Image (cartoon, grey):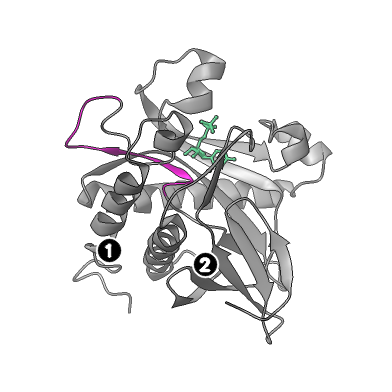
Amino acid sequence: MSAHPVLYEGKAKILYATDDPDVLLTHFKDDATAFNAQKRGSIVGKGEMNCAISSHLFQLLEAQGIATHWLSSPAPNEMKVRSVKILPLEVVVRNIAAGSLCQQTGLPLGMVLQEPLVEFYYKNDALGDPLLTLDRLLLLELATADQVEALRTKALQIDRLLSDFFQKCGITLVDFKLEFGLDRQQNILLADEISPDTCRLWNQADTDPAQRVLDKDRFRHDLGNVEAAYRQVLERVLAQPVQPQGEAML
Ligand code: UDP
């Protein structure tokens, strides 16, 4: 564990300073929360599993030209990242209707969307992370119009890359949440984590609506076998190389 000052402690991670002002250390915790922290618990081994899954996916995305904050993983539940100013937005991409999309629109669970849907939520616990309109986002100056367009383009690129990758793992990427930050030069870097905490992942080998769930919905809805589901994702993700063979970037 780091002897450096804690900069921030969130629900699933602790952020430490390092000797280098441009580098931070993230410690992934086993703590789990859901429904805006109204439900709390712990998933044994989650910190290490999410750190390993995220590290693998960030490296995969970097290899495909997506700039991320990932630098290294010095310990199983630790990730060194570039220091960025996080934009107060949760960028959600959906390929299949689930969760709040179904609750708020009445679309049936599991409906395949014709086109991926990109949504922006206000990252604000006190307000319950509300869904934003573009005009509200601009009114609150959470990002500029150009940044919003860049975020949308990046989110869709990431969706294509991750959907293809999870397909090779026998997993359907239903939806996921991304966070982005700005470095000193105002470059937009993908930040935070990509893990079963932040994605809906369905096992393609299972059609049963409860059995197929390999993500935090098992914790949210008390479906049981949470650790085993996260471990399934970990094993399948790590079995796939970061860089597809024959596609090395020149
Ligand atoms: N999500 C997340 N953090 C949040 C809210 C959502 O990681 O604070 C992820 C969630 O795991 C899912 C996607 O974003 O993969 C879409 O979530 P949804 O809006 O359906 O939210 P829910 O009400 O189901 O949490």
- Magenta: main secondary structure equals loop
Q: Residue furthest bottom?
A: 19
Q: Secondary structure at mark 1?
A: helix
| Left/right of residue 187 with respect to residue 240 in the rendered view | right
Farthest top residue? 106
Q: Is residue 5 left or right of residue 188?
A: right
Q: Position of residue 213 (x, y in %)?
A: 32, 35
Magenta stretch: includes residue 206: yes
- Which class describes the residues within 10 Å of circle 1: few (<14), some (14-19), or many (20+)? some
Q: Nearer the viewer, mark 2 or mark 1?
A: 1
Question: Could you tell me the amino acid type at mark 1?
Answer: Leu
In the image, residue 106 above or below residue 127: above
Instruction: Give percent across and percent down for residue 134.
Output: 70, 34
Q: Which labelled disc corresponds to residue 238?
A: 1
Residue range of the region highlighted in magenta in the rendering: 196-209
Kindly identify which numbered label has been placed on residue 145: none
Q: Residue furthest left?
A: 205
Q: Residue under circle 2?
A: 67
The answer to whether residue 49 of the structure is visible from this angle is: yes
